[in-house]
Amino acid sequence: MTAISVKPKRKSKKRDLAFPIVNTIILCLIMIITLYPVINTIAYSLDDGYDALRGGITVYPRKLSFEAYSNMLKDPAIYQAAHISGSKTIIITLLNLFFTSMLAFALSRREYIFRKFITTVLVLTMYVNAGLIPNYLLIQNVLKLGNSYAVYIIPSMFSCFNMIVIRTYICGLPEALVESARIDGASDITAFFKIILPLCLPVLATVALFVAVGSWNSWFDTKLYNGGKKDLHSLQYLLNMKLATTNNSSNAAQTSVDALASQAQSKTTPITVRCAITVVSAAPILIIYPFLQRYFVTGMALGSVKG
Amino acid sequence: MKKTLALLLAVAMMLALVPAVLAEDLEPITVTVFRGDPGDQPTEDNKIYKLIEEEFGIKFEFEFLAGDLDETLGLKIAGGVYPDLFDGGNSAEMLENADVLIDMLPYISEEKTPNLYKHIYTENRIAQLLDDDGHLHIIPNYGINYNGQVQNAPSGPQFFLQKQVIEFNDYVVPTTLNEYFDLIERFIAANPVNADGTPYTGFAILCEDWRHFCLINPVQHLMGRPNDGEVIVDVNTDAYTTTTFINQPYAKDYYKKLNEEFNKGIISRDTFVMNYDQYIAALSNGTVLGMFDQAWDFGGATAALNDAGMYANTFIGMPLVYDESYGYGVIEEHYVNGTVMNKDRGFGISVTCEDPERMIMFFEELLSDRWQIILQWGIEGEDYYVENGRFLMTDEQYANLNNSEWKRANKANTIWESCPKKQGLMDDGNAWAPGDQAEIYFGQMNAYDIDFYAKLGVRVPGDLFDMTLELAPYGEAWQIDKTPIEIDYEDFNNIQDKRLPELIMAAPADFDALWDAFVEEINPSCEVYSAFMQAEVLKLVEQALGN
Amino acid sequence: MTVNARILPKRKKSLWNIIVQQKWLIIMSVPVLLYVLLFNYAPMWGWITAFQDYKPKDGLMNSDWVGIKNFSWLFSRPEFLDVLRNTLAMSIINLVFGTVSAIVLAVLLNEVTKTGFKRVVQTVTYLPHFLSMVIVVSMAQNIFSSNGVINDFIGKIQDLLIKIGLMENKPMPVFWLGEKKIFWWLQGVINVWKEVGWGTIIYISAMTSIDPCLYEAASIDGAGRFKRILHVTLPGIKSTFVILLIMNIGHLLEAGFEIQYLMENSQVQDYSRTIDVFVMHYGISKMQYGIASAAGMFKSVVAIILLFGANFIASKLGEDSLI
């Protein structure tokens, strides 16, 4: 008996040594592969505009230049736009988390009579889309939300996909948790806020990330409803515009029929601007991520209950 | 005497004050503007817009295009919320078809708006500008010249070669297709690789999306016609017979030549999967010897080559035709056309604009010589100077014109680009556009180019071309709006995009059979397309010659 | 009669009771329901444009009615079947590659014990998600061009093989970007490259709900690392996997737009065009809103059928279902 139990133990010890090494090597390889495009983008963003046109940049800039960044950051409108983008991202994330998780809880309750009906209605919204024009007419002409800050917030307060993600997570929690709360005489809403919500931190962090990234990166809403209102321009909209104008001025001669081959242009080109924009707009999200990462630890949800 | 002088002075001063008085009378308004192009918002204290506000009492709120133009216009039309001044960019037809723009004609008369009147009635231009119902929706933003046209370097479609290849050929510029490829072959035989050891590509063909004109347009030029898009119009008869050329035997000659060159390795197969960025990268590296393109399409590459001091790798354009061996007789080149009005492009006034008359008067004033100079040259002493009656700029002043940050504060670009404007020469011989002014043009030219053109025996690159500047009565056929047949048009383009590269890359023995199959496949679309274009061309000719 | 009369009021009463009992659940969910009805369902009347020759200036009410002309045009196009095939093929490739790679990476990450290293890997792998497709595609086009890094590498291996006599002569370099058959796989690889890290986030968050006791118990039972993964980790994320799978099956006609649009060239067009790219060329950019609507409606109907099908099968198999 003892002999048998010793043997597998040794074997598994050996394997336990081998596995972390192999695993580390694999993960490092994956890191290199996924890091390359990022480094390449940064290298391009720091390269001289004309030099970058030549292509062939890999991991470091050939001819260092900060022009793409300085050109972008010199414009005072950028800061107003960053303010709009930042504030709308925070507001949307909070509201969206609130409504989405509340609904996810309600729809996770198997005894809820409208569960199937509401779920079906909501899930279908992910698959049927009325198209751009009717949506535009609803918000612009019916709800009259054009040229306002509210147009950023009101249409993005709920997302079905995230609701499903949270609901799945809640369903994965032990049923007994809610049951015990109910036995203690707590109402559904108390059970939600006091018991379920704290347990959902990991999934809430995930969903917060999804919502925040989506909202931070959106520019189409600005284009549709606030394009003519320059105080309400979002950062991504402005950056998009910067890129488009660089694209355009690289064919500058198109406008003035006889213009010289653009000799004295400011030395930014679409390639460097595009890359610098990517870096600038991704940076804030990258800063937030480590804070959210704290919640991604196995067993954390249950650990917190027990502790 | 003194009294009369004083009186005259007083009158002169009064006259000078008129615009200011006008502004006092007019209530200040904010005008909303949409431009169907991306753009930069001007700074708050932009000096030209300040001047406009002082003089006209008009403040602007700009919106620029973000994303897709057609989609944006479609939404604006559907929503019914229009800006006061509406420039639909390259899809302004949508605005006209949707009745978004007012008819400007009733507001324009010789007495009230002499500048505008002269602008659009001279040479019977108006005939071409009216729509079928006799309405004028848009005054063209470009293409109306005063005192002749300045064409130093044609920017339209042409064949290009690196200047070093011309040097290699002892400064003899090829004039026919066969000479062109023969020269490329000889150059590559002598210099297979550049200084870094990278092999040269003989000829590149960009065929990405709408830029496929590099692939499908050359044939008409080889046959001695200007840029009519995808058709050849016979201007020698009153019938103006309009035919697509891509399914004709003389198109086969060109693609057969390309097929030969491909099989000789002069054209690389990578060329057909290249996107625009890769194309520009290849050109900027100086390893592509030749291509068919338009100068503005690769402006970035030219700038990059100049920036790196690789002047010998920059390009020079030339007008090629088929030589007599092809059996079409002696063909005279006709690459450069007379200027066409940029019809249907520029500001229209939307039906929701509250005071269209004031907008017209604004355009009228901007078209005065004084405002044209302000808009194009700037403020004397600050942005340019005058010496012996000639308008000049220091290098720094000229460099500012290409500095987008400076322009945001010192130029009224958005308004200028969409407004009616004067091009060509002023009455005193100065050029309206600073870049066209000879002193500035040659002043900006680098030493290599000055030497190169001297050895070539030309003053400017345009001297290589026939500069008769004739324009057929229908203008240039590529301008015709193809909305009514757009699905057929897409098919027509699709077949070419797909089959022409296949033809070029085919084995020489298979070429003839593949060509016949291609012609058979594309013929139905050609018929629809040429019938449509024929009718449109005749309509334009009738409008131009009718009165 | 008497039986029914006795039962009916009782049932009504109990329904009312349930509503009262579940009042909080109703309060929590009905406002969002109304919100969704307004923002997602009300614009659905726009679908009538599928049966119109819609012109923005005429509006939805006054555009010409054309019956099913838009649909028949769409279905009778010679390339429609190709486009449908490409869409399905690429979407299945993306679904399988995307899911498998995300789960594998999530599991590998879960096995890392050093928190610092784990976080670094997580952060790095999810970075490419933030690059725009334009950048990623242009990078990929350089890497896969005939004289790019990949062909360089292959060329070197071939040289080596020739040297040691395992190969006779060097074949032509692979024309990755211009080969019809390669396109589907190439876009799959690029998609995985860009999204693998982002895809793991959802699985990693699902793994947080696994009770650590289960791992301990498995270890005590003598389960090795692979057994633990098989019997604890994977079952722990099964419901997330099943739900995502059902959702994605509904999205099978959404193979993406950007990557195919950006990577399309005349050489691969027959294999690269998806429904969305096709509609872009013939519908939206040509102002043919009717055609775009018809295509949208077709996609939605197929999506709903697939969704309910997948959901039904999942619930029959005793798995968690979406609805």
Image (spheres, helix red, strand yellow):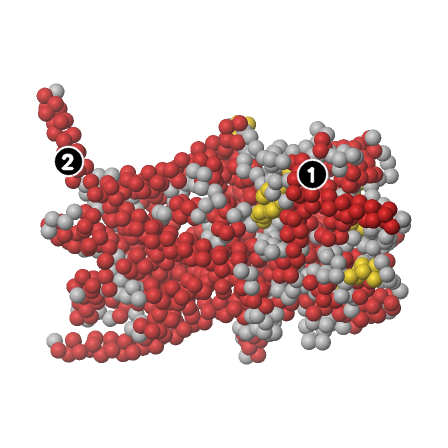
Mark 1 lies on a secondary structure that is helix
- Give the number of the mark in front: 1 or 2: 1
Amino acid type at image mark 1:
Ile
Residue A81 at x, y percent in the picture: 49, 56
Q: Quadrant of the C terminus of chain B?
A: top right
Please give the count of numbered marks on the rendered protein: 2
Mark 2 lies on a secondary structure that is helix
Residue B50 at x, y percent in the picture: 64, 52
Q: Residue at x 46, y 45 (%)?
A: A148
Q: Which residue is mark 1?
A: B360
Q: Quadrant of residue B87?
A: top right
| Alpha carbon distance from label 1 to label 2 | 72 Å
Residue C305 at x, y percent in the picture: 38, 40
Q: Which residue is mark 2?
A: C17
Q: Quadrant of residue B391?
A: bottom right
> Chain under label 2?
C
Q: Residue at x 65, y 40 (%)?
A: B25
A256 or A49: nearer the viewer: A256
> Chain under label 1?
B
| Residue B404 seen | no
Left or right placement of residue C246 versus residue B272 in this view = left
Q: Residue at x 60, y 56 (%)?
A: B45
Q: Residue at x 72, y 60 (%)?
A: B383
